[in-house]
Image (cartoon, rainbow, N blue to C red):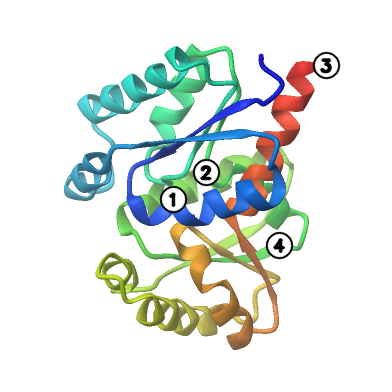
């Protein structure tokens, strides 16, 4: 490992890139962030529906191997719709591989037993809910998760209409105002953080900052 750890940021959509890059610059300036993007993954994942296919899983893992060949010290996945593929990649490689929402889920479990989540990419919901239940069970928690889909938000973001994206996410948050905490499901959704915090009084958690802090912890622990 060089003095600057090399962290591959693995994206399946370009709208996830800016939030995590900003988090890296803010929280871990010493690291060398390398972006790896294959937008076809999210496009094909959206067409598949709830189940992640084996061919798409293999394509995902191939990109993970590319990161290893590029001397990755850690791989941070920013797309939340590939949970089973991330687990297989993690079992195959020797560097830390962080699921997009693992750190945010852990933080949410510490805040109460009634947690809300706002999603904008519908195919990711089932996988994320399964992952949250797994984390909850491992922690011995009986936390209840309520997920709301902010319809049309990610389509607005892809068109470049950030204001409409944020408005739709904030409106979705209003139905979760009684929750102990609200998670913004995807890296791209973190753009709406301030709008959501203006709409509700409860704690609002985002994935990029939590994930970068967790990856930093994992890589530094591996160094010692």
N-terminal-most mark, 1 or 2: 1
Marks 1 and 3, how far apart at CA: 30 Å
Quadrant containing the C terminus is top right
| Mark 1 neighbour class, 10 Å CA radius: few under 14, some 14 to 19, many 20 or more | many
Residue 216 found in image quarter: top right
Marks 4 and 1, how far apart at CA: 31 Å
Q: Classify residue 162 as left or right of residue 142.
A: left
Marks 2 and 3, how far apart at CA: 24 Å
N-terminal-most mark, 4 or 3: 4
Task: Identify the residue at image location x=62%, y=45%.
Answer: 211
Q: Classify residue 7 as left or right of residue 180.
A: left
x, y percent for residue 113: 71, 62
Numbered circle sitting on residue 113: 4
N-terminal-most mark, 1 or 3: 1
Q: Classify residue 115 as left or right of residue 53.
A: right
Foreground tag (1 vs 2): 1
| Mark 2 neighbour class, 10 Å CA radius: few under 14, some 14 to 19, many 20 or more | many
Q: From where the camera sits, is residue 105 visible?
A: no
**Residue labelled with disc 1:** 17
Numbered circle sitting on residue 115: none
x, y percent for residue 130: 48, 45
| Mark 3 neighbour class, 10 Å CA radius: few under 14, some 14 to 19, many 20 or more | few
**Residue labelled with disc 3:** 224
Secondary structure found at label 3: loop
Marks 2 and 4, how far apart at CA: 21 Å
**Residue labelled with disc 2:** 100
Q: From where the camera sits, is residue 216 visible?
A: yes
Foreground tag (4 vs 1): 1
x, y percent for residue 128: 47, 49
Task: Identify the residue at the far right of this view.
Answer: 224
């Amino acid at each position: 490992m060089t003095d600057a750890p090399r962290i591959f940021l693995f994206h399946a959509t370009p709208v996830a890139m800016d939030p995590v890059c900003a988090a890296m610059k803010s929280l871990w300036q010493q690291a060398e962030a390398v972006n790896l993007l294959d937008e076809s993954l999210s496009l094909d994942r959206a067409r598949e529906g709830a189940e992640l296919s084996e061919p798409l899983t293999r394509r995902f893992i191939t990109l993970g191997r590319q990161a290893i060949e590029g001397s990755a010290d850690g791989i941070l996945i920013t797309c939340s719709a590939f949970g089973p593929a991330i687990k297989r990649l993690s079992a195959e490689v020797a560097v830390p591989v962080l699921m997009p929402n693992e750190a945010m889920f852990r933080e949410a479990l510490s805040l109460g037993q009634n947690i809300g989540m706002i999603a904008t990419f519908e195919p990711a919901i089932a996988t994320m809910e399964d992952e949250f239940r797994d984390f909850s069970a491992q922690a011995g928690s009986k936390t209840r998760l309520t997920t709301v889909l902010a319809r049309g938000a990610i389509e607005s973001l892809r068109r470049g209409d950030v204001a409409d994206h944020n408005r739709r996410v904030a409106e979705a948050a209003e139905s979760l105002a009684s929750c102990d905490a609200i998670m913004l499901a995807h890296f791209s959704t973190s753009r709406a953080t301030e709008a959501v915090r203006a709409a509700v009084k409860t704690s609002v958690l985002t994935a990029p900052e939590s994930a970068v802090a967790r990856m930093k912890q994992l890589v530094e622990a591996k160094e010692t």
